[in-house]
Image: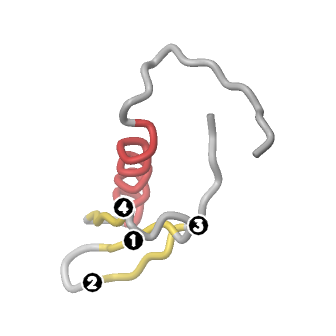
Amino acid sequence: MKAKMTMIYWKGEKFWLGKLLEHPEIMTQGKTLKELEENIKDAYRLMVMEDVPEQFKLKAIAI
């Protein structure tokens, strides 16, 4: 499952900082821009998919 999101980022004194526009509560940092991007992906997976086992199914539903 791939979700496309927008990362807002800026350079702090020591690290690159960023958060997701669609989930502003998910924020992290990295020594490089590439590390920041990997860290924000990991943070998203932990926050959103933490309790979901590796073997899961998808089903579209109307809400």
Label 1 and label 3: CA atoms lie apart by 10 Å
- Residue type of the residue flagged with mark 2: Gly
Q: Nearer the viewer, residue 7 or 23?
A: 23
Q: Nearer the viewer, residue 10 or 48?
A: 48
In the rendered view, tell whether residue 42 sits above or below residue 54: below
- Residue type of the residue flagged with mark 1: Gly
Q: Nearer the viewer, residue 60 or 34?
A: 60
- Residue type of the residue flagged with mark 4: Leu
Helix, strand or loop under label 3 = loop
Q: Specify the farthest residue to the front.
A: 63
Q: Residue at x 42, y 20 (%)?
A: 53
Helix, strand or loop under label 4 = helix
Residue 37 spot, x, y in % from top left: 43, 58
**Residues under numbered marks 4 and 1 in contact, where contact means CB atoms less than 8 Å apart:** yes
Residue 22 spot, x, y in % from top left: 56, 66
Helix, strand or loop under label 2 = loop
Where residue 12 is drawn, which disc sits there? Answer: 2
N-terminal of the two: label 1 or label 2? Answer: 2
In the rendered view, tell whether residue 41 sits above or below residue 16: above
Label 4 and label 1: CA atoms lie apart by 7 Å
Crowd rating for badge 2 (residues with CA inside 10 Å; few <14, some 14–19, many 20+): few
Crowd rating for badge 4 (residues with CA inside 10 Å; few <14, some 14–19, many 20+): many
Q: Residue at x 36, y 51 (%)?
A: 43
Label 4 and label 2: CA atoms lie apart by 12 Å
Q: What residue would you read off at disc 1?
A: 18
Residue 28 spot, x, y in % from top left: 31, 64
Q: Is residue 45 left or right of residue 14?
A: right
Q: What residue would you read off at disc 3?
A: 6
N-terminal of the two: label 4 or label 2? Answer: 2
Label 3 and label 4: CA atoms lie apart by 13 Å
